[in-house]
Image (tube, helix red, strand yellow):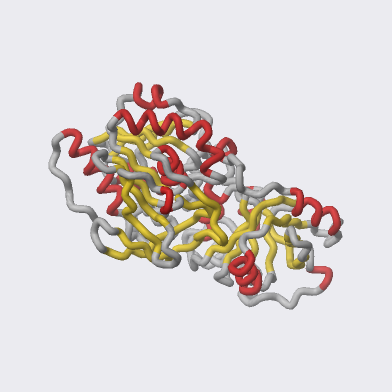
Amino acid sequence: MTATPAPWTETALTARLVLDDGTVIAGMGLGATGSAAGEVCFNTAMTGYQEILTDPSYAGQIITFTFPHVGNIGTNDEDTETSNLASRSGVRGAVLRADITDPSNYRATAHFDRWLKARGIIAIAGIDTRALTARIREKGMPNAVIAHDPSGVFDIEKLKGDAKAWPGLLGLDLVPDVTSGQSYSWDETRWVWGEGYGRNESPDFHVVAIDYGLKRNILRCLASAGCKVTVVPATTSAEDVLARKPDGVFLSNGPGDPAATGTYAVPEIQKLVESGLPMFGICLGHQMLGLALGAKTQKMHQGHHGANHPVKDSTTGKVEITSMNHGFAVDRETLPAGVVETHVSLFDGSNCGIRLEGRPIFSVQYHPEASPGPQDSHYLFTRFVNAMRAQKGVTAEPER
């Protein structure tokens, strides 16, 4: 099978991407059959499509991959990011440029198309993803319906109506779709070449991680930093968290509008802030910490999705290349007194990190666990653990 786009015939056009402005894009259907509505975004990462498609933060979205060759290394049983093993990530679909090739990686255990089918993800290939990306950059992220039918026969008017009727992510709480249904413990550490994943058998600290859509590699980074992790569902009360006697609290990534999830999560976060415990938030956890501290969040025009985003850490003066996936952001103009901006995007100047003065509480918008992406930001897990060390009077370790 060639890696270049196939010369599709009309009989091969078994999928449609229908935008809410009535635009109809035809292509070859892959993965699951049926239809699904969602917001179309684009991701510029060149690697890690399996991690991207299993990231719970993508719930409610249709991902356009700007890198043309997606699926060529197959899939495996280790790179899935959904921490709740009983759930799917919630991603609504994938848009690809080139046809899927046979797997070419020694770690592959399944063909990408078969993996998509097993996870219920609809995909469309043969699309001019450059043109679609340019459209998103100019007009913003559209709502759309992605549909796959082997017959190639579609009720286009119905699909147009479904695309227009989908309410969009603004005001939408998607966390109930991806959070864990019960608490569990985690001790698996980061992957090491030639060894695979390890175990943290002698943790120094206990962290309670509130699961708004947790990624496995975040948990692995916490375990590798010396933490025993207890994961609890998104609706867990502050009292229940504190009853577990943690040394620190982690607020996870997740999908949807932070203001919508914040209706029940923010009051509990505010109680945890008052407890004085060290706290670290990522992505949705960062946005909801911002809300809890008095800031506001806003919907972005095209969002940040990729593994090449430069961010400056004002606490060190360093610029790091980061992995991002978010369509909402903390509005830096609304940060109240006592809340300090620590990180900023060098692409558009948007807020990428905050800390609370006088408290061991901080958060970042991007994904320091780097799955997929560069590992420039792993130091943040050391920063979090150092906050817990300080609470116990233990000497801090260098950030690395």
330 is higher (above) or lower (below) than 346: above
Residue closest to the eye, 259 or 124: 259
Measuring 75% from the left and 56% from the top, which residue is drawn there?
147
**Residue 388 drawn at (x, y percent):** 23, 38
**Residue 134 drawn at (x, y percent):** 61, 72
Quadrant location of the N terminus in the rendered image: bottom right
State whether residue 54 appears in this view: no
- For this view, does 43 lie left or right of residue 287? right
- For this view, does 32 lie left or right of residue 79? right
**Residue 279 drawn at (x, y percent):** 32, 39
State whether residue 275 appears in this view: yes
Measuring 31% from the left and 49% from the top, which residue is drawn there?
340
107 is higher (above) or lower (below) than 77: below
204 is higher (above) or lower (below) than 79: above
Residue closest to the eye, 100 or 168: 168
**Residue 33 drawn at (x, y percent):** 74, 53
- For this view, does 374 lie left or right of residue 41? left
